[in-house]
């Protein structure tokens, strides 16, 4: 991203997060994808956020492309170093036109401080949950450190800090109260629970057969989400969870933790995170261009140019490795890792059954 002129507000920003932070350690990890349905649904359960998604998003048309491209700038607010505040301002800009009145007559705006902070709080809790279940767990001191880091992370957006709890204990109270009293099962949430992976147009396979192939994977994600939900949310969603389910999830989490000991960083880390580690270690220039989402995650043609969509300009249709070296196995692994983090985004656009395409 290029800025036409320096933003005076950026001068008041705290220092961005760096490689010494726990947030860097966990947020760019591929394992966060295990909680994809969890974070998508719990974000949308917030009434104002869900209304914005329902009326302005095209998630049902391109569920995976939309998520895959959005992750790049979201990762950037953590990993872009001195440019993190600019990336935060870019994300803030995507939300200016997302406003309106929902079916119950409630006004909403994506830049309402409480709504915007809720989305950020879910990303913070994503780190906590993934580390707890799939990365070996966290100590109380590490949770407090992550909380302090999430405050610095949120400051990069240039939003009001009013909704941000002052301490880790205050945050736990905020999270519990919001889950018990404010979240709801709305149409945007149900869309996440019923999400399907669109079949690529070029694949000669009946759509029902394609859907059957991926039904177990999506069911597994819903099962994991049920286990990670707070009890109040689980009950509201009508999900069943037994002590046996909890034991099984913990065992699976330990197996995932052990398996990832053998996963190289080039696969494990999101491309934006991997590029950041390269810059910090001196293996790439500090001012190297930021890694942007690949072209096949772009919004549909009828939505390109709308201010709510991230659609970067690229010199190359595919992200290049952060270090310009001759072809070698490591570079090929980085290219493979980039594709792993955008899995299924090559799928063609196909409106979900029972829903009309967005205008």
Image: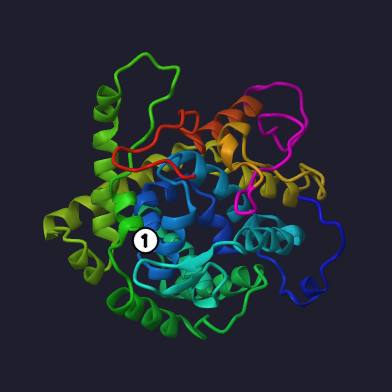
Q: Is residue 326 above or below residue 302?
A: above
The residue lying toward the viewer, choosing from 129 and 157, is 157
User: Residue 125 lies in magenta, yes or no?
Assistant: no
Q: Is residue 105 left or right of residue 28?
A: left
Q: Residue at x 48, y 51 (%)?
A: 57
Q: Is residue 148 above or below residue 41?
A: below
**Looking at the image, can residue 347 be seen?**
yes
Q: Which image quadrant is residue 12 in?
A: bottom right
Quickly name the residue at label 1.
132
Count of numbered circles in the view: 1
**Looking at the image, can residue 266 be seen?**
no
Q: What percent of the width, then of the height, locates residue 151?
A: 58, 75
Q: Is residue 245 above or below residue 92?
A: above
Q: Which image quadrant is residue 210 in?
A: top left
Residue stretch in magenta: 306-329
Q: Residue at x 45, y 17 (%)?
A: 202
Q: Residue at x 73, y 29 (%)?
A: 316
Q: What percent of the width, then of the height, locates residue 70?
A: 56, 49
Q: Is residue 342 above or below residue 96?
A: above
Q: Is residue 188 left or right of residue 62?
A: left
Magenta stretch: dominant SS? Answer: loop
User: Residue 309 lies in magenta, yes or no?
Assistant: yes
């Amino acid at each position: 991203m290029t800025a036409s002129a320096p933003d005076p507000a950026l001068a008041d920003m705290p220092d961005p997060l760096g490689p010494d932070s726990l947030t860097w350690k966990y947020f760019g990890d591929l394992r966060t994808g295990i909680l994809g349905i969890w974070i998508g649904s719990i974000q949308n359960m917030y009434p104002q956020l869900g209304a914005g998604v329902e009326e302005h998003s095209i998630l049902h048309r391109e569920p995976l492309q939309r998520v895959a491209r959005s992750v790049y700038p979201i990762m950037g607010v953590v990993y872009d170093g001195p440019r993190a505040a600019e990336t935060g301002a870019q994300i803030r800009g995507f939300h200016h036109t997302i406003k309106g009145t929902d079916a119950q007559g409630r006004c909403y705006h994506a830049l309402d401080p409480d709504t915007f902070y809720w989305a950020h709080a879910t990303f913070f809790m994503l780190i906590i949950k993934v580390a707890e279940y799939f990365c070996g767990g966290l100590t109380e001191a590490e949770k407090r450190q992550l909380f302090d880091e999430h405050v610095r992370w949120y400051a990069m957006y240039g939003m009001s800090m009013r909704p941000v709890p002052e301490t880790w204990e205050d945050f736990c109270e905020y999270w519990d109260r919001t889950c018990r009293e404010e979240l709801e099962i709305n149409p945007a949430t149900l869309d996440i629970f019923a999400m399907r992976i669109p079949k690529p147009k070029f694949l000669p396979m009946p759509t029902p057969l394609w859907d059957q192939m991926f039904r177990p994977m999506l069911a597994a994600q819903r099962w994991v989400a049920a286990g990670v939900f707070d009890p109040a949310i689980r009950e509201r969603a009508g999900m069943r969870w037994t002590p046996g389910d909890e034991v099984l999830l913990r065992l699976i989490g330990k197996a995932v933790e052990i398996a990832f000991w053998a996963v190289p960083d080039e696969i494990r880390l999101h491309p934006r995170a991997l590029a950041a580690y390269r810059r910090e270690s001196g293996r790439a220039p500090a001012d190297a261009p930021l890694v942007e989402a690949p072209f096949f995650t772009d919004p549909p043609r009828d939505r390109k140019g709308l201010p709510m969509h991230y659609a970067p300009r690229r010199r190359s249709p595919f992200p290049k490795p952060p270090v310009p070296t001759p072809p070698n196995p490591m570079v090929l692994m980085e290219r493979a890792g980039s594709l792993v983090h955008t899995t299924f985004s090559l799928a063609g656009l196909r409106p979900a059954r029972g829903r009309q395409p967005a205008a």
